[in-house]
Image (cartoon, rainbow, N blue to C red):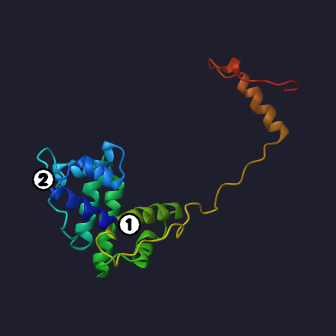
């Protein structure tokens, strides 16, 4: 669907259409969502009204797709420092394996590296790959998009709550009364507090 929309935009611009017409066609309401089509650094119309330079250009492999994805996202204001490094590492992983396509299995295997890392880190890595796969699928129909929930961020290994005894609560309240902080007087007390 994304590829179809992209090609429609290219055709409208090639036929001399304006960014306003493109916005109406795509249902965009803000100028910020149309920024990529107007940015000459990325083949956009700029001030000359020329069509996008690379509308019909296919993505030439995963590395090229990664570079285009990061260029577009960064042009829209995303920093993607950590995500950019992650994607570079994932491309290296895929190339090392000899994979020419992004698959769910490969994304999952890369995401759980290193094996000693926290599962929340694995889930974050898979999220980065999932977002990239969504982009890449517009250019390569064989790209597999990892489904959400494949790796959970919460591991269930949270620290159990510490039940304070009445004596510990009393000691904390007494200690708080002796703090040399300007808001000490604002510390609420209740009837029956020690």
At x 32%, y 73%, the residue is 93
Tell me where residue 73 appears, x and y as whole percent: 30, 54
The furthest residue to the right: 192
Tell me where residue 168 appears, x and y as whole percent: 79, 38
Q: Mark 1 points at which residue?
A: 134
Q: Is mark 2 on a helix, strand or loop?
A: loop
Query: Local crowd at mark 1 within 10 Å, few (<14), some, or many (≥20)?
Result: some
Q: Is residue 4 visible?
A: yes
Seen in the picture, residue 81 relative to 131 is either above or below; the reply is above
Q: Which mark is residue 155?
A: none
Q: Is mark 1 on a helix, strand or loop?
A: helix
Q: Nearer the viewer, mark 1 or mark 2?
A: 2
Q: Quadrant of residue 2?
A: bottom left
Q: In which quarter of the image is residue 108?
A: bottom left
Q: Mark 2 points at which residue?
A: 50
The furthest residue to the bottom: 98
Tell me where residue 43 appears, x and y as whole percent: 16, 55
């Amino acid at each position: 669907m994304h590829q179809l929309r992209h090609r429609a935009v290219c055709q409208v611009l090639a036929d001399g259409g304006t960014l306003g017409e493109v916005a109406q066609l795509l249902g965009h309401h803000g100028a910020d969502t149309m920024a990529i089509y107007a940015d000459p650094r990325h083949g956009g119309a700029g001030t000359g009204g020329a069509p996008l330079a690379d509308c019909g250009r296919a993505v030439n492999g995963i590395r090229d797709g990664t570079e285009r994805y990061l260029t577009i996202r960064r042009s829209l204001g995303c920093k993607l420092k950590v995500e950019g490094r992650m994607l570079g590492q994932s491309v290296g992983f895929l190339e090392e394996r000899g994979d020419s396509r992004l698959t769910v299995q490969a994304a999952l295997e890369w995401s759980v590296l290193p094996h000693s890392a926290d599962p929340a880190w694995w889930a974050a890595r898979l999220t980065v790959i999932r977002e990239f796969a969504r982009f890449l699928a517009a250019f390569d129909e064989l790209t597999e998009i990892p489904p959400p929930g494949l790796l959970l961020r919460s591991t269930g290994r949270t620290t159990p709550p510490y039940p304070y005894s009445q004596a510990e609560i009393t000691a904390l309240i007494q200690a708080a009364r002796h703090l040399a902080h300007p808001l000490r007087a604002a510390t609420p007390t209740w009837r029956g507090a020690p």
